[in-house]
Image (tube, grey):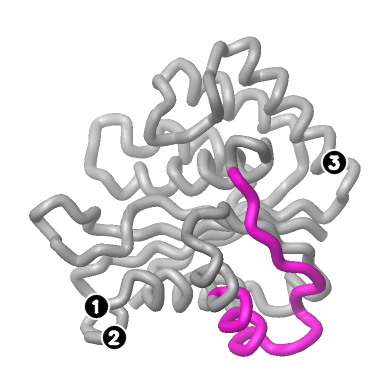
Amino acid sequence: MLVLIDESGCAGFKLGKGSTPRFVVGMVIFHDYAEAERASRAIGEARTALRVKPEFKFSKCSDWARDGFFRVVDAHAFQVRALVIDKAKIYSSHLRLSPDSFYSYFVQLLISRAGGALMGANVKIDGSGDREFKRALSVYLRREIGPGKITKLRFTDSRQDNLIQLADMATGAIARSYSGRADANRWRSMLAPKIANVWEFQ
């Protein structure tokens, strides 16, 4: 099993002064590696056809490119799970004052909530952050999630990984659905057949 993880929004708490009101962390799950490879190739071909450079990134793509992307990936078998955090409901000073701790905690919570569904998974996470943060996150996830659930954990540059781009686009579509904009549900509705669960943190 292959799991790709990415986020939408920031971990900051300057609400009303630039920080996003919500943070969404999402995962894309492929149960079949051959299907993951087919999807990766299709995304690469779509990037060329839609003239998207250097990568599919929901926050930077045009509406036209988003439409084209979700039409392409609809043909492939994968699941999406996401955790939505309304930051106004976070009262822990530790999480509010430490973006790294905030990010780590909610990535761990998303993985843990999937339960046995991720047993033996090969997990790839968008590779933001410095080396020390990645090392600390890896140790934290393995400790909190428990032994045996994750076979392999690595960090990947989204520009070099089509499937991390899929995680970005899926997570971005779910995050947009909470925006209140006129087009809020446009891309989430296209993704809907793939969505296994969207959990709103309380």
Q: Amino acid at mark 2?
A: His
Above or below, comparing residue 85 to residue 202 in the picture: above
Above or below, comparing residue 119 to residue 69 in the picture: below
Indicate yes or no whether the magenta region holds residue 122.
no
Q: Which mark is residue 88?
A: none
Magenta stretch, residue numbers: 137-157
The earlier-in-sequence mark between 3 and 1 is: 3
Helix, strand or loop for disc 3: helix
Q: Quadrant of the N terminus?
A: bottom right
Do residues under tags 3 and 1 come within 8 Å of each other at their CB atoms?
no
Q: CA distance from mark 3 to mark 2?
A: 40 Å
The earlier-in-sequence mark between 3 and 2 is: 3
Q: Which residue is mark 3?
A: 35
Q: Which residue is mark 2?
A: 94
Q: Residues within 10 Å of mark 1 (few under 14, many from 20)?
A: few
Q: Which residue is mark 1?
A: 97
Do residues under tags 1 and 2 come within 8 Å of each other at their CB atoms?
yes
Residue 68 at x, y percent in the picture? 56, 19
